[in-house]
Image (cartoon, rainbow, N blue to C red):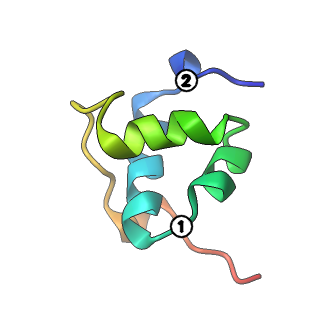
Amino acid sequence: MATVKTLTPEQVSTIKARLAQGDFQHRIAADFDLNQGRISEIATGKRFADIPSAATEASYVRQSV
């Protein structure tokens, strides 16, 4: 399992963009091989508060399921 310390700034920006789009935290966590609690910490600003969200259109294309 990856750790939150190994995330790159680009990955954190992508996570924030997906959160802003309304993606579920547990799905984002699965995509990044993280615990959902780490995604929650990013969402609330407890971690990586200084990294801005990526532009949603360019950073992540939502896949149809």
Q: Which residue is mark 2?
A: 4
Q: Tell me which numbered mark, 1 or 2, is placed earlier along the sequence.
A: 2
Q: Residue 41 occupies which quadrant of the picture?
A: top left
55 shown above or below 57: above
Relative to 32, is 37 on the left or the right? left
Q: Nearer the viewer, residue 17 or 39?
A: 39
Name the spot of residue 8 as percent of width and height, x first.
48, 27
Relative to 55, is 14 on the left or the right? right
Disc 1, SS: loop
Disc 2, SS: helix
Q: Which mark is residue 23?
A: 1
Relative to 35, is 5 on the left or the right? left
User: Which quadrant is home to the C terminus?
Assistant: bottom right
Check whether the beta carbons of the residues at disc 1 and disc 2 lie within 8 A of each other: no
User: Total label count?
Assistant: 2
User: Which quadrant is home to the N terminus?
Assistant: top right
Name the spot of residue 48 as percent of width and height, x first.
33, 29
Please report the residue visible at 67 percent of the width from the left and 76 percent of the height from the top. 63
Name the spot of residue 37 as percent of width and height, x first.
57, 36
Name the spot of residue 31 as percent of width and height, x first.
70, 49
Please report the residue visible at 29 percent of the width from the left and 37 percent of the height from the top. 45
